[in-house]
Image (spheres, rainbow, N blue to C red):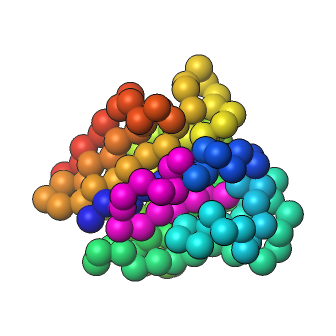
Amino acid sequence: MKIIVLSDSHGDVKTVKQVATLPADAIFHCGDSELVADHPLLNDVHIVRGNCDIDTRLPSSIVQKVGGHTVFIVHGHEHDVNRSLLTLSYAAAEKQANIVLFGHSHMYGAELIDDVLFVNPGSTTQPRGGNPATYASIETGETLNVRFFTLQHQLIDEITFKK
C-alpha cells in the first residue's frame, strides 16, 4: 500500500495539484491548504482543517481505513505537536489508529511510538528548520517505509520501521 501525504500548502494550488496527482492508494492533506472544501483539486484528497483554514466544512480530523490500516489525520495545532506527540498519541489510541498523519510544525519527520507510526510530511510551501519544501510517501508491507521528497521529487530522507 502507498500513501502520499502533504501539509501546510497555504494556498499554493499548483503545488497541491503536483503532489495530489501522484500515483497512490490514498492521498492525505494534513491541513492549512487554505482551499475551500469543494475545490476540485480536493476531490480525491482526504483533507483536514488547519489553524489557517477558514472553511468550516473541512473536518478537524479524519479516520480512514486504507489497506488494512487505520489512519488518523489531524493538523496538529489542537494537539500541541510543536511540544510533544503525547496528546496526539492519546487521541490516536482513542481512534485505534496505527498510522497518524499531522502537520502544523512545517518540519518533516517520522516516529514509531508503541507500534503507531507518526508522520509529519513537512510543508510544501513554507518549510522550517532549514529544510526544503517536502511531501511524504508511506509504503507498507513487511516494514513501514517513510520517504520524504522535495517538490522536484528528489528523495531527501528515508526511514524504515519494522512492524
Using the image as rendered, state which of residue 36 and residue 115 is in the foreground.
36
Using the image as rendered, state which of residue 83 and residue 124 is in the foreground.
124
> What is the quadrant of the C terminus in the image?
bottom left
* Residue 102: % across, % down: 56, 55
Please provide the residue range marked out in magenta.
18-32
* Residue 123: % across, % down: 61, 40
Using the image as rendered, state which of residue 56 and residue 41 is in the foreground.
41
Above/below status of 90 relative to 120:
below
Above/below status of 94 relative to 74:
below
Horizontal side of 159 relative to 32 (left or right) equals: left
Horizontal side of 75 relative to 93 (left or right) equals: right
The residue that appears at 57% across and 32% down in the rendered structure is 133
- Please tell me whether residue 136 belongs to the stretch shown in magenta: no
- Quarter of the image holding residue 128? top right
The residue that appears at 55% across and 25% down in the rendered structure is 131
- Please tell me whether residue 23 belongs to the stretch shown in magenta: yes
> What is the quadrant of the N terminus in the image?
bottom left
* Residue 129: % across, % down: 60, 24
Identify the residue at the far left of this view: 142
Using the image as rendered, state which of residue 138 and residue 154 is in the foreground.
154
* Residue 149: % across, % down: 42, 36
Above/below status of 46 relative to 121:
below
